[in-house]
Amino acid sequence: MIFPEKVPGLRLLLGLWVVYTAVWISLEGSLVQVVMMGTATAVLLLGHGWQRWLGGKTVSRGLGVVVTAVSGAVLGAGSGLLTFVFMAVKTGLHAHGPEFTQAEIAWVWNVLPLWTVVWLLVGLGLGLLWAGQKQ
């Protein structure tokens, strides 16, 4: 398996992320918006990491599947953890009470293991599909 030197669409996603961030900062806190922010940031960081450390490298099929599965788990866990970071940033930016309720914070905490496992399985599945292709 050969990892691509450039992750397709990463620059476009970065541009969309910058625009979304500028809009997101001015809006009142919304759980959907902050989860989107955390997930998009995790995708960007993972894509940049793939380009930097794996771009153009050839690995065995087994190692490639492991890398995609671990990347999926990192994406799932990173999405939840970055969501917490952005919740804190959003609350700190506005000069009033907390932006997010305890129930919303608890919800993110409770689904974090689910996101990690789901994205691990997505990464594993994509890795197996990629490994099964003829090179």
Image (cartoon, grey):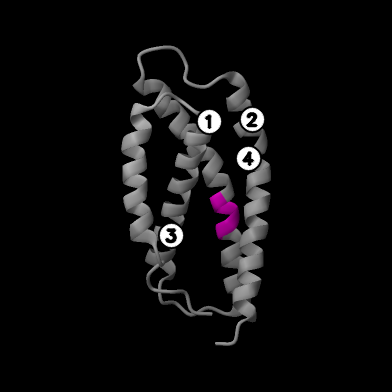
Instruction: Read off the magenta span.
Output: 71-75
Q: Secondary structure at mark 3?
A: helix
Which residue: 55% across, 59% down? 71
Q: Which residue is mark 4?
A: 112
Q: Quadrant of residue 20?
A: top left
Residue 31's label in the rendered image is: 1
Q: Secondary structure at mark 1?
A: helix
Q: Which residue is mark 3?
A: 47
Say which of marks 1 and 4 sits in front. 1
Q: Amino acid at mark 2?
A: Trp
Which residue: 59% across, 87% down? 134
Q: Secondary structure at mark 2?
A: helix
Say which of marks 4 and 2 sits in front. 2
Q: Which residue is mark 2?
A: 107
Which residue: 56% across, 66% down? 67
Considering depth in this image, is 28 or 123 the residue closer to the camera? 28
- Quick one: label 1 or label 4, which is nearer the N terminus? 1
Q: How far apart in space, not on screen, are marks 4 and 3 (Cα)?
A: 20 Å
Left or right: where does residue 17 sit relative to residue 107? left
